[in-house]
Amino acid sequence: MYNFSFVILNYKTIKETKECVNSILKNIENSRYNIIVVDNGSNDGTGIKLKKIYRENRKVYILMTNENLGFAKGNNYGCDFAIKEFNPDFLFVINNDTVIEQNNILQLIIDEYLESKFDILGPDIKTLNNSHQNPSYSVLQDYNELILHLKRMRKLIILNKLNLDKFYHIIRKWKSYFFDLTQKDNKLLTRKTNVPLHGSALIFSKEYIEKYENVFNKSTFMFGEEEFLNYRRKRDNLLFVYNPKIKIIHKEDATSDFIFKKEYEKRKFIYNNSYESIKKLIETIDRDIENGDYIV
């Protein structure tokens, strides 16, 4: 029998976290799982409220950090707890604004693992506007793409200070509309291997867990986690699998929309953190190249 640990990061958005946790408790038939919620330094009483709500549920564990550790370190905190306390065969790391409705989702994961022995598995992630986030081809994969993204973020940081960056996004949306830069649905119905995966729902196997000190690279605060994982895939010959039979609903951006009431402040947060994360990834790649651990 295989054991699962769900890890969910919460920051002040208790409504979404409750819906996520309750969707797991309601729908999953397999009894060999637990849920670890990390209240990531909310400092508004959210963590205490969650503890009271689930205090009698032996499947749910609420952890609290003293500060906001960001996405990677916050999830690592929950994953470390799960590994030490439960030694799971699979870590299912999901955003708190996701919902699970398949009652056989754990069996589908086991079936895929028995077939492929994946390192990381990605489900079909469907948003409320019926778009699909996996495979995540928006993930930067090429070294030159990373350099160009860094330059782009630097420009957007400057434009944001002048409140002119919104025009850049208007042009991008215009190009997407006329040149059809989106994925076709028929491409999403096929199982794929060695493709980049979206960070809102990731299933890590024990093989992956045992290879690394941290599930996520701890260099980032927010954004860039998918690029770091994809770099690990290429450098270490990991097997990533996208299986559309496994499904999850993503309400998307609940935490950032809650925190940032002004759109330009949200964009500023994205630019700055994306810039820092990709900068650190480039430094990591350069160091690995210099040490002979990776060839571009």
Image (cartoon, rainbow, N blue to C red):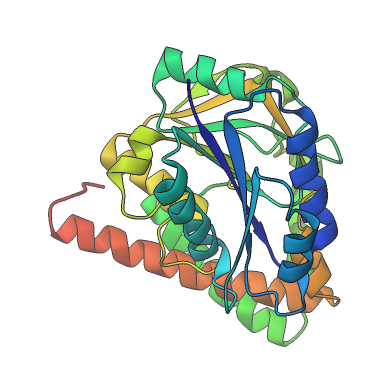
The one of 85 and 230 positioned closer to us in this rendering: 85
Residue 145 in view in this figure: no
Of all residues, the one furthest to the bottom in this rendering is 162
Where's residue 220, x and y in %?
47, 67
In the rendered view, tell whether residue 189 sits above or below residue 93: above
- Say how many tags the image has: 0
In the rendered view, tell whether residue 203 sits above or below residue 259: above
Q: Residue at x 42, y 69 (%)?
A: 279
Q: Which residue is drawn at 62% across and 30% down?
A: 123
Residue 282 shown left or right of residue 108 in the figure: left
In the rendered view, tell whether residue 92 sits above or below residue 43: above
Where's residue 292, x and y in %?
13, 52
Where's residue 236, x and y in %?
27, 40
The one of 12 and 184 positioned closer to us in this rendering: 12
Q: Residue at x 61, y 72 (%)?
A: 271
The one of 47 and 99 positioned closer to us in this rendering: 47
Residue 277 in view in this figure: yes
Where's residue 174, x and y in %?
81, 52
Kindly indicate the quadrant of the structure image that contains residue 182: top right
Q: Residue at x 48, y 20 (%)?
A: 1
In the rendered view, tell whether residue 197 sits above or below residue 105: below
Residue 161 shown left or right of residue 190 in the figure: right
Residue 195 shown left or right of residue 136 in the figure: left
